[in-house]
Amino acid sequence: MKKFISILLVAAMCMALFVGCGNSDSDYKYITDNGKMVIGITIYEPMNYYDENNKLIGFDTEFAEEVCKELDVEPVFQIIDWKAKETELKAKNIDCIWNGLTVTEERKADMDFTTTYLKNRQCVVINKANESKFSTTEGLASAIISAEAGSAGETAVKSDANLKNASYIGSDTQAAALLGLVAGNFDAIIIDYTMAKACVGEGDYADFMIVESIDLEDEFYSIGFRVGSDMTEKVNAIIDKMIEDGRLAKIAEKYDRTDLYNEAVNN
């Protein structure tokens, strides 16, 4: 009996040791020990994109660089397949998702969200020549439309009573959806308002317009970390600091997103 009790005590001590070690293995320690934070992104203006010198810039790019400076780690930006973002995060191929990531109830099961920092909405973009034809979701029910696969835009298509009846084709990225509209492959696309405001009506997209008469749901951007990650609290503290000292407002002003920033932080 004594021998049996001794075995149980040893087993209990081993289990306690195992649990203790598991609890001490935090995301913060993992990232800081590596000396870098691998940030999952896609390329789209104005959040993460390349300038004329092939330098990665953007609202989220500069925001992430400031946060990493506070954490004393190197930001490593890694382009990912947006459809596989949750898998990439869980597998530790990336440490966070930071690319105009919309907070949704569904995504809360797969990641922890930080404080929101920018308001957004999904919007419909069409050729100006089709303004009278596609001014409502009812009109778009017979159209060929696209959105980035796995995005909030795709969710908007599938959840709207009229849009879900349209012929839908998923695109790899929002930029690909825009190019498809240029090529005439789609009648309309659903993309982030932040992106549409940055490019629609200019250059290759001069003939396009945002259909302001179609009001899709508002949403907010956040940074996604692994479920239960202690990085969420760490980064929230830095976000609060950047809001207080005005650094985040300056980034928003630089990328002409002051109004959407103010609506998010004052929400």
Image (tube, rainbow, N blue to C red):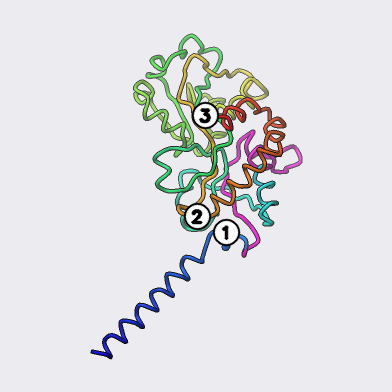
| Range shown magenta | 33-62
Q: Nearer the viewer, residue 204 or 245?
A: 245
Residue at 66% x, 27% y: name it. Answer: 258
Instruction: Specify the amino acid type for callout 1.
Output: Tyr
Residue located beneath label 2 in the image = 229
Residue under the point 51% across and 13% down: 130
The residue that disc 3 covers is 191
Residue most extreme to the left: 1
Q: Residue 39 appears at what percent x and percent y?
A: 59, 50
Q: Residues within 10 Å of mark 2 (few under 14, many from 20)?
A: some
* Residue type at numbered disc 2: Ser
Q: Report which quarter residue 7 is drawn in.
A: bottom left
Q: Is residue 215 above or below residue 29?
A: above
User: Camera-side residue: 176 or 227?
Assistant: 227
Q: Are marks 3 and 1 in contact (CB under 8 Å)?
A: no
Q: CA distance from mark 1 to mark 2?
A: 8 Å
Q: Is residue 246 left or right of residue 44?
A: right
- State the SS at label 1: helix
Residue designated by label 1: 28
Give the side of residue 52 with respect to residue 234, left or right.
right
- Mark 2–mark 3 Cα distance, whole angstroms, equals 30 Å
Q: Secondary structure at mark 2?
A: loop
Q: Earlier in the sequence, mark 1 or mark 2?
A: 1
